[in-house]
């Protein structure tokens, strides 16, 4: 196990991945191990708007959500304390969000196979995920495939197909090996 203090060279750590890839679970666990603050971008947006993400989509539309998501991300990217940010599954794909995250911190893509996604994104979970509500499984996979080119620009990619412990271990090892540490403030 790599001692947590070695990873304190990073100011901001961003977690990327499709819906259901485990960003919140991994992010909270990682934040605890490294003594960083955990920030869930969707929760921050919900607090600002005083609405659930699904309500923002239905009442104000996706484009409105994307703009708020972009602004909220910029606010986080200006923070000078140590934060681990779970970015919504679509965040790296809009505006220059991927670039902002790659320049202001370490980006980690949690890779999950379509087979595991299908198991995790059960129908009952779809109510909280407005994008999935009316999509067939094939359309969900198409969305996932379309986003891969953005996800692949992350500095670190780890599989979260197996158990959390293995995923966390892989993240800690890769963080330790990372040569270049982007730390620009917006
Ligand atoms: C979205 C993912 C969601 C949330 C919103 C849109 C997306 O976050 O931001 O429903 O476009 O993939 P999670 O990936 O945390 O579920």
Image (cartoon, rainbow, N blue to C red):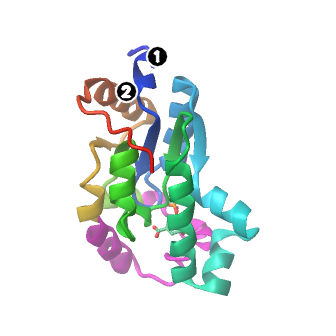
Determine if residue 26 is in view. yes
- Residue nearer the viewer, 155 or 54: 155
What is the distance, in whole Å, between disc 1 and disc 2 at their CAs? Answer: 11 Å
The secondary element bearing badge 2 is classed as helix
Residue for badge 2: 172
Could you say whether the residue bearing mark 1 is in a helix, strand or loop?
helix
Q: Is residue 128 magenta?
A: yes
What residue is shown at x 23% (from left), y 63% (from top)?
149
Q: Quadrant of the N terminus?
A: top left
Is 88 situated above or below 57? above
Tag 1 and tag 2, C-beta contact below 8 Å: no
Could you tell me which residue is drawn at 40 percent across and 45 percent down?
Answer: 104
Q: Quadrant of residue 141?
A: bottom left
Badge 1 crowding class, 10 Å Cα cut-off, few under 14, some 14 to 19, many 20 or more, is few
Task: Please tell me the numbered disc located at residue 5.
Answer: 1
Assess disc 2: are there few (<14), some (14-19) or many (≥20) residues with their C-alpha within 10 Å of its C-alpha: many
Image: magenta residue range:
118-147
Name the chief secondary structure element in magenta. helix
């Amino acid at each position: 196990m790599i001692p947590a203090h070695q990873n304190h060279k990073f100011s901001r750590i961003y977690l990327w991945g499709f819906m259901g890839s485990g960003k919140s679970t991994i992010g909270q666990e990682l934040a605890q191990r490294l003594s960083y603050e955990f920030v869930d971008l969707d929760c921050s947006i919900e607090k600002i708007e005083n609405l659930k993400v699904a309500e923002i989509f239905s009442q104000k539309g996706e484009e409105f959500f994307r703009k708020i998501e972009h602004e909220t991300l910029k606010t986080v990217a200006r923070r000078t304390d140590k934060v681990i940010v779970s970015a919504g599954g679509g965040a790296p794909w809009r505006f220059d969000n991927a670039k902002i995250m790659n320049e202001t911190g370490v980006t980690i893509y949690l890779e999950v196979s379509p087979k595991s996604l299908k198991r995790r994104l059960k129908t009952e979970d779809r109510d909280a995920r407005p994008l999935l509500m009316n999509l067939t499984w094939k359309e969900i996979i198409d969305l996932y495939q379309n986003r891969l080119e953005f996800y692949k620009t992350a500095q670190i990619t780890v599989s979260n197909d197996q158990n959390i412990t293995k995923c966390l271990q892989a993240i800690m090892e890769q963080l330790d090996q990372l040569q270049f540490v982007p730390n620009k403030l917006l």
